[in-house]
Amino acid sequence: MVTLDKAFTAEGSPNIALIKYWGKRNERLILPHNSSLSITFDHKALRTVTSVMFSKKLKKDIFYLDGKKQDLNDRDIRERFSIVEKMRRMAKTPARVIVVSQNYFPTASGLASSASGIATLVYVINKALGLGLNAKEMSIIARQGSGSASRSLFGGVVVWNKGKRHDGKDSFAQQLFKEDYWPQLIDNIVVVSTSKKKVPSRAGMRTTVNTNPLFKQRASSAQSRLAEIKKAFKAKDISKVAECTIADSNEMHALMLSTIPSIRYLNSASYAVMDAIDELNAREGKAIAGYTFDAGPNANIITISKYQGKVTRALSRLKKGGMILYVKTSRLGEGPRILPESRSLIKKSMLGR
Ligand code: PMV
């Protein structure tokens, strides 16, 4: 049942893909060329809090992101907001909505803010509109807002199966391992820049698919690496997980680099982080940490507790040299959850009446 004039609030976390998705076979439905695998962050480390309220008293939809009112005529925002329209149609309600979303980390800097934003939005709207969708159904909707959002509906280690169907009904994420599966696993979120990315991932992927001859090989290479990393997770083999993670990030960024015109998200600080981790692994004689980068210069470095001290030391040298702004650590985290009413972010002044 649709609940009107009552605010609902949820929190969710971004995820970082260790096997990356870059390239769509269907742009409208957001269907990927290859399956991907990610880990979901702990809500304590990085999170998005989103409140929604549906009301017939609202004249139009209102959207606040990180304290700023958003222009719903902006193409990128409208495309992502289209999932709201979809869910409203499912609930058969004409009520307008106010959405207030706050990211507790830098937005659009390759820290997957769209993933947690959209996954949390779908989750909280499902509650407000009383749609009763399960996680798989919510993942299918979130996917159509932002591909990586399909994975943030789940905690732990998550696989987004690319699916085969043209209608996308078999393209959704599933949990591979729960959040308590590998308590020793640590992700270091290394922030080297908080500026917005130059090329939105949507446009960047399109150019890669359309212009890059190397793209043909990407799907099969990612699929076989996915099989390899799944085995490594099953065996809790950090060296194999790290090797696959590094290889897949480098493959995706090589693909971006060789796109015409070239897309480059990494900067000199990103390369310094890569050097530091490569050197650390070489000194140890095996991979004890793996780096990965999304569509931005910030790094994620995965390792396990017993090697964390070594990773911290390697990173603190770079921090002293001014290459790194800050580092946050996260364990495997849970999927989205509903927060009490008192946590609502909706203020009277935002309603515009
Ligand atoms: O979720 P999107 O459509 O913005 O794409 C994000 C793609 C990467 O973050 C670069 C990789 C991934 O699989 O998350």
Image (spheres, rainbow, N blue to C red):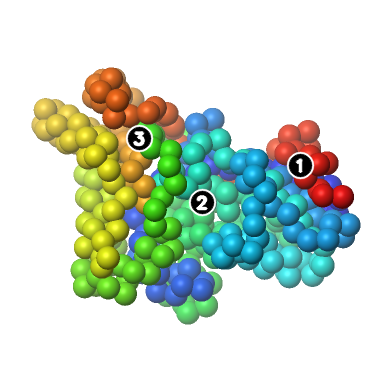
- Three-letter residue code for mark 2: Ala
Residue bearing the label numbered 2: 115
Residue at x-position 58% and y-position 53%? 118
Q: Name the image quarter holding residue 66.
A: top right
Any part of residue 105 in sight:
yes
| Real-space CA distance between mark 2 and mark 1, rounded to the nearest whole angstrom | 21 Å
Q: Is mark 1 within 8 Å of ligand 1?
A: no
Q: Is mark 3 within 8 Å of ligand 1?
A: no
Q: Earlier in the sequence, mark 2 or mark 1?
A: 2
Q: Could you say which disc has been placed on residue 346 in the image?
A: 1
- How packed mark 3 is, by other alpha carbons closer than 10 Å (few <14, some 14-19, many 20 or more), is many
Residue at x-position 73% and y-position 34%? 343
How many discs appear?
3
Is residue 267 left or right of 171 when viewed as pictured?
left
Residue bearing the label numbered 3: 192
Secondary element at image label 2: helix
Camera-side residue of 286 and 208: 208
Secondary element at image label 3: loop
- Three-letter residue code for mark 1: Ile
Q: Is mark 2 within 8 Å of ligand 1?
A: yes
